[in-house]
Amino acid sequence: MSDNPAPPTEIQRDDVEAVERLKNAFEKLKVEMSKVIVGQTHVVEELLMAIFSRGHCLLIGVPGLAKTLMIKTLAEALNLSANRIQFTPDLMPSDITGTEIIQEDKATGTRQFKFFEGPIFANIVLADEINRTPPKTQAALLEAMQERQVTVAGERHFLPQPFFVLATQNPIEQEGTYPLPEAQLDRFMLNVLVNYPEEEEEVEIVKLTTGESKARVEKVFADQDILQLQEIVRKVPVADHIARYAVRLARTSRPPRGEGAERDRQFAALPDFIRDYVMWGAGPRASQYLVLAAKARAVLHGRYHVSVEDIQAVAGPVLRHRIVTNFNAEAEGIKADDLVARLIKYVPIDESDPPGGVKIFRVG
C-alpha cells in the first residue's frame, strides 16, 4: 500500500511549487535561528508545524533553556509581532485582553469609552508560566485561542492574523500553581518538550552568549506568506488508510466508558498497557491534530502528501498531554510518552493486520 497519491493536477501545481519554496525557506529559517539558538531543531520544527496548522503550543521545560529567546527569535525571522505575558497569581483577564477606559473629548466635553488593546493583540503571544495564574485568567485565553477574538463589554475585537499562542510550564515547581484543566490543555495542538542541550551544544551556547557580538536574524517570511502556507497545509491530500491509522491511534488510547457487556467487550479488546495505566484517552481533537500536524510536517519536508512516518513523528507532541495516566502508571514511573511509544508499536498501519509487530519508521 503506497502513501503517495496520484500526480498533482494543474490546480495543485502552484501549491506544489509553494511547498518546494517552503522547504527551502525552512532550511534558511533553521540557519537564521542557529545564529541565536543552539540546537533544539526539533522544537523549532514542531513550533512551525503548529503555526502552519493554525494551532497553539504548550512548551514544557526547566528554566534557562531559552524558551523566551526562541520565540522572540522565531517571531523576528517570520517577520511577526510578538508579545510576552508573564503569568502571575495577581494577573487579571483584562491584563491580557485589554480594557475600556473613559476618555473625555476636550473640544466637546463629551466622554466615551475607548478600548485599549492588551498584549494578546500580537501575531505570537508567549504566555510564560501559564500555570502560575488562577483559572479565571487562564480561561481568558480560551476564546482568543479558539475564536481568534476577544469580547470586552459585549463588543468583539478580532486578533491579528496569523495568531499563535505559545505557553510555557516549568515541570519542576508545582507549589503555588494552578494546573490547567484537561479542556484547556486540549486546546493546545502540540505539547513540546524542551530538553537540556548536549555538552557540545552547551559549550557553543556559552561561547555565543558571553561575547560582545550580537547576531542579526534576517527575515525569512512575510505575514501574508504564512497565511498562504496555512491554506496550502489544509489542501495537502491524505490517503484514507493514513487517516484511519491516525484515528486508530487516538481511539486505542481510550478506555471505554459506560456499563454492561459492550463495555466489557471493548475493555477486553484494548492492549493491556491501556487497560492498566490509562484513566482517560485522547479525544477526537487528537485525531484531527494528528492529521493536520502530519500535513504540516510533510510540507516542511517538501512533500505534498502525508505518510505513515509523518503520523508517527507527530504522535508524541499531539498525544502526550491528552492521555491521562492513573495511579498504577504513576507508581511504576510510566509516563504518557511511554504509552504513546507502545501505541505506535501496537496499532497496525493497515486495519486488516493484527495488532502488534508494527513497522516503526525513523521519525528523526
Image (cartoon, rainbow, N blue to C red):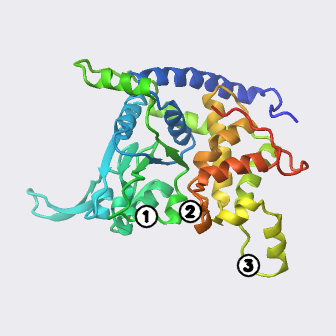
60 relative position to 257: left or right? left
Q: Give the class, few, some or many, for how many residues have Cα within 10 Å of label 3's Cα (few <14, many ≥20).
A: few
Q: Quadrant of the N terminus?
A: top right
* Residue 64 or residue 251, whichever sits in front: 64
**Looking at the image, is 64 positioned above or below residue 169?**
above
Q: Amino acid at mark 1?
A: Pro
Q: CA distance from mark 3 to mark 1?
A: 27 Å
In the rendered image, the residue lying farthest to the front is 332
Distance between mark 1 and mark 2 Cα atoms: 17 Å
Compared to residue 278, the image places residue 306 above or below, namely: above
Residue 299 showing in the rendered view: yes
Q: Nearer the viewer, mark 1 or mark 2?
A: 2
In the picture of the structure, the residue carrying the numbered disc 3 is 258
Give the residue at x 68% y 26%.
16
Is any atom of residue 38 visible in this view? no
Real-space Cα separation, disc 3 to disc 2, in angstroms? 25 Å
Lower position in the chain sequence, tag 1 or tag 2:
1
Q: Amino acid at mark 3?
A: Gly
Residue in the picture at 56% in, 34% down: 228
Query: Mark 2 sits on what residue?
Result: 330
Say above or below: 138 vs 77. below
Mark carried by residue 179: 1
User: Which numbered disc flags the more N-terminal residue, 3 or 2?
Assistant: 3
- At 24% from the left edge and 20% from the top edge, which residue is drawn? 211
Judged from this view, the residue extending furthest toward the top is 213
Say which element carries label 2.
Answer: helix
Picture coordinates of residue 11 (x, y %)? Answer: 73, 30
- Element marked by disc 3: loop
Image quadrant where residue 265 sits:
bottom right
